[in-house]
Amino acid sequence: DSGVTQTPKHLITATGQRVTLRCSPRSGDLSVYWYQQSLDQGLQFLIQYYNGEERAKGNILERFSAQQFPDLHSELNLSSLELGDSALYFCASSVASGGAQETQYFGPGTRLLVL
Amino acid sequence: AQSVTQLGSHVSVSEGALVLLRCNYSSSVPPYLFWYVQYPNQGLQLLLKYTSAATLVKGINGFEAEFKKSETSFHLTKPSAHMSDAAEYFCAVKTGSSASKIIFGSGTRLSIRP
């Protein structure tokens, strides 16, 4: 158990809908990262928040957005969902701002299925 | 740009045999390299990481990896495979220029034959 929690574990929804994925980092960790794992794209970095502020951005679509709240939990919002958004979404956390040597600890993921 | 290439999407070994999972990296600056393992229906767990100290890195569950700059490789090995090692393994890289994000390889699925 990494100490990173994600809810829900599974989510089934329809195209065009909007969903929110939630992540709680390990106690004391200030950074939260979001990754998408799909069969065709593999594991891809989406976005990082550090202490409430956006820190780094990866291959995140404009339909997707995230935020980190004062209690450091984070939410990933996915809107206007398409079939291709079906994937496993991971959250990870690290102790500080994400330096090269920092370890990222991953949560169990949220499996999203868009029908 | 940094990248990692994992050779072999699927590796099958017998129980008790040597495990060798191959990873080559590309980076214009000294890299930080990681191996993660993903068991079925679970998240990623860090096996080991190289951060420019010793070139031979020991990780959990008997795994180790050796950083070879001349070969731009960071292969993962385990002397004797166990049935519980069956999982997907990901090699990953971070560098100082993009320290926040991890760039993952495509993964290698390890199967263990009884």
Image (cartoon, grey):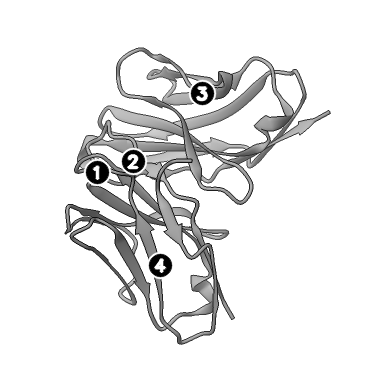
Q: Is residue A107 above or below residue A13?
A: above
Q: Nearer the viewer, mark 3 or mark 2?
A: 3
Residue kind at label 2, given as amino acid type: Gln
Report, in whole angstroms, how far the alpha carbon at label 1 lies from the one at label 2.
9 Å
Share a chain, discs 4 and 3?
no
Which corner quadrant of the image does residue B70 belong to?
top left
For the residue carrying disc 2, how many other residues have a C-alpha within 10 Å: few (<14), some (14-19), or many (20+)? some
Task: Verify CB contact (< 8 Å) between mark 1 and mark 3.
Answer: no
For the residue carrying disc 1, how many other residues have a C-alpha within 10 Å: few (<14), some (14-19), or many (20+)? some
Residue kind at label 4, given as amino acid type: Leu
Q: Which residue is mark 3?
A: B60
Report, in whole angstroms, how far the alpha carbon at label 4 lies from the one at label 3.
30 Å
Report, in whole angstroms, how far the alpha carbon at label 1 lies from the one at label 3.
26 Å
Q: Nearer the viewer, mark 4 or mark 1?
A: 4
Residue kind at label 3, given as amino acid type: Ile
Q: Which residue is mark 2?
A: B2
- Which subunit holds the residue at mark 1? B
Quarter the C terminus of chain B occupies: top right
Query: Left or right: where does residue B43 sit relative to residue A29?
Result: right
Query: Left or right: where does residue A89 sit relative to residue A45?
Result: right
Task: Verify CB contact (< 8 Å) between mark 1 and mark 2.
Answer: yes
Share a chain, discs 3 and 2?
yes
- Which subunit holds the residue at mark 2? B
Secondary structure at numbered mark 2: loop
Q: Which residue is mark 4?
A: A21
- Which subunit holds the residue at mark 3? B
Q: Which residue is mark 1?
A: B98
